[in-house]
Image: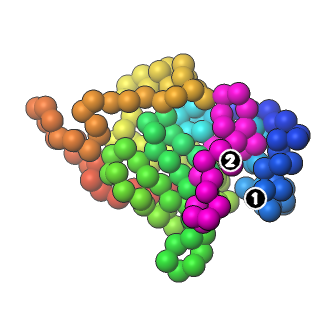
């Protein structure tokens, strides 16, 4: 994991606009880092921003109640949003299913799982031999694009396993 440096003024602005403190996991990431590059840069967890990574407010829409918190190298997006039970949980929109999945974890549990190594299992059907070198070369920059898309079934063999739900554990 790479911890990107933060600028104190940017961090203070993000914390103020989000109305959070550094005593929460989200506040700690935003207040003390520009962001995190996890798993060779496969996952980019948003903080107060750097040249290589936007800040957490960059695509936030306060009226929607959804806060983007991370992106993956394939264009997948993680947001913190209220679930039907009224609790904020992490939701994922990935290139394989093209629909939102409630991961049923709060930000702290999700980040702990991510940092503890759960990404290998979560992305097992989307990674390829040598992905570490390719992804490491674009860490913090725009991600990869694939044709056909991961949801399409073209060619001699179907994309087995991509239609099943996944969960970070």
Front residue of 132/41: it is 41
User: Which element type, helix, strand or loop, lies under badge 2?
Assistant: loop
Q: Is residue 167 magenta?
A: no
Q: Is residue 64 magenta?
A: yes
Question: Magenta residues?
Answer: 45-68
Left/right of residue 94 with respect to residue 32 in the rendered view: left
Residue at 60% over, 69% down: 88
Quadrant in which the N terminus appears: top right
Residue at far left of view: 156
Determine the image quadrant of residue 139.
top right
Determine the image quadrant of residue 126.
top left
Contact? badges 1 and 2 (CB < 8 Å):
yes
In the picture, the disc for residue 18 is 1
Residue at 29% over, 48% down: 162
Residue 73: x percent and y percent? 49, 34
Residue at 66% over, 37% down: 54
Distance (Cα) linking label 1 and label 2: 9 Å
Front residue of 169/148: it is 148
Left/right of residue 108 with respect to residue 16 in the rendered view: left
**Dominant secondary-structure state across the stretch colored magenta:** loop
User: Which element type, helix, strand or loop, lies under badge 1?
Assistant: helix
Residue at 53% over, 34% down: 42
- Residue 54, visible in the rendered structure: yes
Residue 15: x percent and y percent? 81, 54
Residue at the spot of label 2: 56
Q: Residues within 10 Å of mark 2 (few under 14, many from 20)?
A: many
């Amino acid at each position: 994991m790479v911890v990107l440096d933060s600028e104190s003024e940017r961090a203070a602005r993000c914390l103020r606009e989000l109305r959070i403190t550094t005593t929460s996991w989200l506040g700690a990431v935003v207040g003390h880092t520009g962001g995190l590059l996890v798993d060779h840069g496969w996952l980019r967890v948003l903080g107060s921003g750097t040249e290589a990574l936007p800040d957490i407010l960059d695509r936030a829409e306060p009226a929607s109640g959804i806060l983007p918190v991370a992106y993956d190298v394939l264009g997948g997006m993680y947001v913190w949003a209220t679930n039907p039970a009224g609790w904020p949980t992490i939701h994922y929109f990935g290139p394989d299913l093209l629909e939102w999945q409630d991961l049923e974890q709060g930000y702290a549990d999700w980040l702990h799982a991510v940092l503890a190594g759960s990404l290998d299992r979560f992305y097992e059907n989307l990674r390829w031999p040598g992905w570490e070198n390719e992804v490491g070369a674009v860490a913090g920059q725009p991600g990869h694009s694939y044709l056909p898309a991961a949801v399409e079934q073209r060619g001699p063999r179907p994309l087995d396993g991509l239609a099943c739900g996944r969960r970070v554990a």
